[in-house]
Image (cartoon, rainbow, N blue to C red):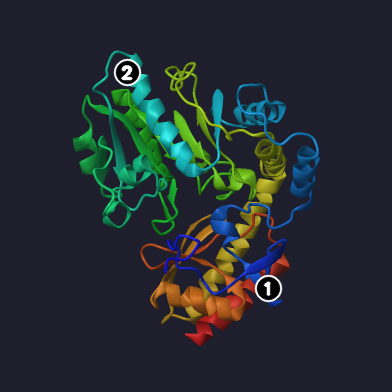
């Protein structure tokens, strides 16, 4: 008999009933150190007081009115994002998947309005993850994501990650956009080198192609800049954001330049819940902290501390781990042991990590994790490695 909850997840045997900072507490009272942060969602940890206050105050006022009316919290967050980024305009969604759908629509509508309706193709890369909608799985293109869900949405060209020759050969008059994650998350914590991101920007400029960046997982302070592309000094035309922007509340958005968004006029897109007062109130509280230069400087300091300790862990357990990769507090342990075994051993040792492709274990802690919790993380990761 099928369970009442559709069985699409291979869930760990853990049930959490409370969170405090970087810690989660199970229904039987165990405390686990959370280095997964809900897959890079809980950017400021669990039950962070300013977020609780923002949500509570908004909940006592108004929860939902729909986008038929002006929403002050939405306007405030949009203004904050425009002030802190390349963007001129913002559309709010509830998830990264929805942000992907709009990014694809926006790029294609741009060229339609320019009198080039055949310019619909979007170049994507192997190992990518852009959500599980029809557009998202077609953009990723992997067999794992797409098997059984055909016919797939057409209009996506897939290139191997790092295939520069293939990229240049793929450029044609039909290319509307290039879509890429500055750091692949699900693909195994694979950063795109700054020189490559600059090269992509130059290629887009040369051929009039739109650049779409998927910063759903690597954005909102995760790499030590507010958004990962800032390290390279280039800016996209369209950017997908979610996860950390809501600090745990379902919230996403698409940021765009005025030119890239020029085709999206009245009635071209919409969302019932997107940009609701609750989500935007929390998002503004997140951005007020994470967008602060001193906060981001401390993320970089903590990232250096954590990486140094992880390098020592790899050196101490060469049969379990191969190397450390990633940027900021978006780090991966490339494993020699099976990565899911490492994750399971972590549960036994009281530490939460997240598996990814390429036999990698992701470490995505809260951006405000304390130094003492970083020390404890290494103690528990060491215990996990010893179990293997």
Rendered location of residue 206, percent (x, y): 31, 25
Which residue is depicted at the point 65% across and 56% down?
Answer: 301
Tag 1 or tag 2, which sits nearer the N-term?
Answer: 1
Closer to the camera, 299 or 268?
268
As drawn, 374 above or below 279: below
Give me the disc on residue 27.
1
Q: Which residue is mark 2?
A: 112
Disc 2 crowd, CA 10 A, few/some/many (<14, 14-19, 20+): some
**Residue 383 placement, left or right of 121:** right
Whether residue 356 is visible here, answered yes or no, is yes
Disc 1 crowd, CA 10 A, few/some/many (<14, 14-19, 20+): few
**Residue 213 placement, left or right of 374:** left
Closer to the camera, 202 or 135?
135
Which residue is depicted at the point 63% across and 54% down?
Answer: 42
As drawn, 326 above or below 69: below
Q: CA distance from mark 2 to mark 1?
A: 54 Å
Rendered location of residue 208, percent (x, y): 32, 23
As drawn, 151 above or below 84: below
Provide the secondary structure element on which disc 2 rests: helix
């Amino acid at each position: 008999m099928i369970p009442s909850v559709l069985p699409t997840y291979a869930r760990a045997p853990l049930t959490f009933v409370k969170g405090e900072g970087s810690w989660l507490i199970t229904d039987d009272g165990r405390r686990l150190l959370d280095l997964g942060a809900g897959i890079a969602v809980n950017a400021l940890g669990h039950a962070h007081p300013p977020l609780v206050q923002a949500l509570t105050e908004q909940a006592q006022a108004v929860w939902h009115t729909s986008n038929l009316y002006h929403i002050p919290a939405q306007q405030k967050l949009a203004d904050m994002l425009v002030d802190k980024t390349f963007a001129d305009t913002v559309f709010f969604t509830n998830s990264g998947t929805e942000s992907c759908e709009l990014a694809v629509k926006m790029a294609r509508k741009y060229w339609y309005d320019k009198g080039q309706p055949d310019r619909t193709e979007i170049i994507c890369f192997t190992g990518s993850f852009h959500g599980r909608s029809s557009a998202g799985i077609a953009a990723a293109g992997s067999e794992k994501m797409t098997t059984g869900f055909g016919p797939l949405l057409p209009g996506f060209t897939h290139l191997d990650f790092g295939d520069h020759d293939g990229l240049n050969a793929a450029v044609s008059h039909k290319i509307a956009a290039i879509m890429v994650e500055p750091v692949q998350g699900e693909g195994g914590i694979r950063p795109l080198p700054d020189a490559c991101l600059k090269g992509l920007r130059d290629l887009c400029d040369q051929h009039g192609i739109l650049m779409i960046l998927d910063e759903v997982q690597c954005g909102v302070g995760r790499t030590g800049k507010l958004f990962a592309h800032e390290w390279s000094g280039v800016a996209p035309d369209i950017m997908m954001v979610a996860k950390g922007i809501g600090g745990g509340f379902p919230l996403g958005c698409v940021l765009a330049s005025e030119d890239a968004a020029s085709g999206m006029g009245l009635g071209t897109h919409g969302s019932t819940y997107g940009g609701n007062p609750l989500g935007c109130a929390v998002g503004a509280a997140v951005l007020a902290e994470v967008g602060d230069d001193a906060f981001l400087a401390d993320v970089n300091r903590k990232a250096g501390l954590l990486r140094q300790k992880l390098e020592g862990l790899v050196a101490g357990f060469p049969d379990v781990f191969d190397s450390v990769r990633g940027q900021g507090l978006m780090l991966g342990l490339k494993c020699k042991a099976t990565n899911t075994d490492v994750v399971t051993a972590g549960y036994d040792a009281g530490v939460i990590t997240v598996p990814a492709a390429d036999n990698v274990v992701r470490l995505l802690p809260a951006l405000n994790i304390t130094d003492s919790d970083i020390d404890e993380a290494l103690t528990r990761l060491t215990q996990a490695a010893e179990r293997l």
